[in-house]
Amino acid sequence: MSWTRCSGPPPAHSFALPKEQRGPEIKPSLKWEFSRNLGRIEQKIKGPFVMGDAFTIADIVLTHCLNWASGAKFPIESQIALDYAKAMRARPAHQRAAALAK
């Protein structure tokens, strides 16, 4: 996968990209967008998992996004999201996968 920048500010991956590719000036808008969409997802959670009682790929994706946001120092102010992320990270399968990444 490659990234080609045509115009506008550089990406805001300030913790992952080389210094010359960082663009912190767009981080506020990304934080706003993340918060807005997280609020929309929270309204849909009707059980212990995103889709209710069954663990699905949506849970893997949302947990990944929450972990990424935490690493990027995006504020996660929602107790629902914080509790959800904590519960997903406590799952034995998540802990096994996380151990492989170390």
Image (spheres, rainbow, N blue to C red):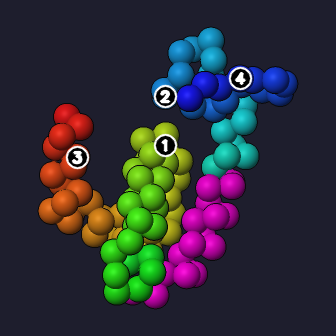
Q: Which residue is mark 2?
A: 15
Q: Which mark is residue 4?
A: 4
Q: Earlier in the sequence, mark 3 or mark 2?
A: 2
Give the foreground label among 1 and 4: 4
Q: Residue 87 at x, y = what percent?
A: 28, 69
Q: Which residue is mark 3?
A: 98
The magenta segment: 32-47
Q: How many C-alpha atoms fall within 10 Å of the one at disc 3: few (<14), some, or many (≥20)? A: few
Q: Residue 95 at x, y = what percent?
A: 18, 54
The type of residue carrying mark 3 is: Ala
Give the foreground label among 4 and 3: 4
Q: Are marks 3 and 1 in contact (CB under 8 Å)?
A: no
Residue situated in front as seen by the camera: 34 or 79: 34
Q: Is residue 95 left or right of residue 24?
A: left
Q: CA distance from mark 3 to mark 1?
A: 19 Å
Q: Residue furthest right?
A: 7
Q: CA distance from mark 4 to mark 3?
A: 30 Å
Q: How many C-alpha atoms fall within 10 Å of the one at disc 2: few (<14), some, or many (≥20)? A: few
Q: Are marks 2 and 1 in contact (CB under 8 Å)?
A: yes
Local SS, label 2: loop
Q: Earlier in the sequence, mark 1 or mark 4?
A: 4
* Residue 36 painted magenta: yes
Q: Quadrant of the C terminus?
A: top left
Q: Is residue 25 left or right of residue 49?
A: right
Q: Which residue is mark 1?
A: 73
Q: Residue 34 at x, y = what percent?
A: 62, 55
* Residue 56 painted magenta: no
Q: Quadrant of the N terminus?
A: top right
Q: Is residue 101 left or right of residue 48?
A: left
Q: Residue furthest top?
A: 20
